Image (cartoon, grey):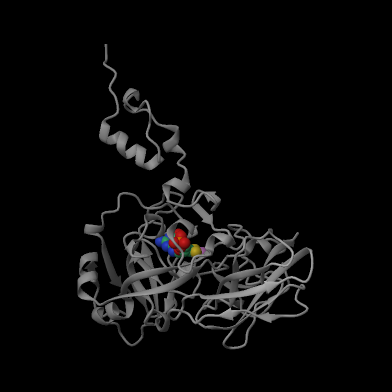
Amino acid sequence: MKRRSFVSKTMLASIASTIGYDVVFGNRLPDGYNLLGLQDPDPFTLFDKDSQMVLLNDKPWNMEAQAHLLDDAITPNKFLFIRNNGRVPENIDADSWTLTFDGESVRQEKTYTLAELKSKFKQYTYQLCLECGGNGRSEFDPPAKGNQWTIGAVGCARWTGVRLKDVLADVGVTDDAMYIGYHAADTHLSGDPSKEPISRGVPMAKALQLETLLAFQMNGEAIPLVHGFPLRLIAGGWPASASGKWLNGISVRNRVHDGEKMMGTAYRVPCNPVAPGDEVANVDMCIIQSMPVKSLITYPKSGAILKSGETLQIRGHAWAGELEVSKMEYSIDFGSTWQLYSLEKPVNRLAWQHFKAEVAFPKKGYYEVWARATDNQGKAQPMLLPGWNPKGYLNNACHRIAVKIA
Ligand SMILES: Nc1nc2c(c(=O)[nH]1)N[C@H]1C(S)=C(S)[C@@H](COP(=O)(O)O)O[C@H]1N2
Ligand SMILES: [Mo]
């Protein structure tokens, strides 16, 4: 008779850390048995996310925040949205991780280990906002396919790494360099190893900015796996799709990078406004560059109830892609009149800016507080929806919350 063998103690410990609970009768677990809890992991535990985060999809994993969860000045991991196009890579070994530079416009192909990148180049830390180009997609009509993000696909963490510009200087690029494209270790949902889930990039001018980093830390610690451990490109202020996670290659191109999700309607919008639902020809689509001016009220949570006669502190953050926010206003009368919030400067370029106001309400009843940011080129957020586009990108409509005075 075959003896029943059991799962080892070390195996049990690793299972417990994945599930987030001890397997109580683990010593009786037959070897080879597939735990349900492992087949269907709880993503909040798996990725260290707050349970108030909202799961949009599990294959691939996509999760967004709610406005009130983004109240911190610097977004902690537990409130940072997740956007994956493919499968999160497994069994990453940071010690043997390499980044290879190739493409038409490098003087020679060059590979760095992670340790070389860290020791050879000066390290910088910046607070950099990442917002998915599709944040706000759920409001477009006719609806756009894709993750139905509401407002929570944005966050502003502190990233530490080396400047891409310094590394590119070390690699040596030729005069015809026009664009960089990233390559990464995540795998295509189809399982086909020849397909990249996503390979986007930015023009050289953005690649060479001081804040464009090859990052290995987020908020002072190794980047969490789901956010790109052990190495990530960070191009703040642009659609976050330009910030490649699990970065293992950069191609320096003598043309616009033509990797996965650079063409068609992916991360592109009509160069000129179109009517909702219109078909737009490929040649009339333009790549999204800097994200538009936007803001979020992060305190209080929508639906707050206040006693009559009390004032309420309203606060939140505003950002404007490559630009700075120069004015922040609120309205409690559905946009008829606007008052100024106080607005802080960003801690560095491409970080979000904090705003607040003490707001008084004239009498009992239901109110909405609206917030409207204006960038330093004079562009303000639209009160309702901005221009419709086939994939529902760039919705920077004013955020609003409900307040009841009892
Ligand atoms: N390798 C890789 N990088 C990627 C993605 C991806 O699927 N694979 N998704 C991109 C998109 S569309 C967004 S919005 C951001 C999301 O970053 P986050 O999950 O760290 O919030 O990562 C970008 N970088
Ligand atoms: Mo995205």
Q: Quadrant of residue 400?
A: bottom right
**Residue 324 placed where, x, y %?**
52, 83
The residue positioned 42% from the left and 47% from the top of the image is 46
The answer to whether any part of residue 111 appears in the image is no
**Residue 18 placed where, x, y %?**
38, 42
The residue positioned 41% from the left and 55% from the top of the image is 226
Judge left or right: residue 92 versus residue 380.
Answer: left
Q: Quadrant of residue 328?
A: bottom right
Dividing the image into 4 quarters, which one contains the C terminus? bottom right
Q: Is residue 149 above or below residue 293?
A: above
Q: Is residue 289 above or below residue 50?
A: below
**Residue 374 placed where, x, y %?**
62, 82
Residue found farthest to the top: 1
Count of number-bearing discs: 0
The answer to whether any part of residue 216 appears in the image is yes
Frontmost residue, 329 versus 248: 329
Judge left or right: residue 194 versus residue 141.
Answer: left
**Residue 22 placed where, x, y %?**
37, 34
The residue positioned 38% from the left and 60% from the top of the image is 228
Frontmost residue, 70 versus 29: 70
Q: Is residue 279 above or below residue 20?
A: below
Judge left or right: residue 319 versus residue 307.
Answer: left
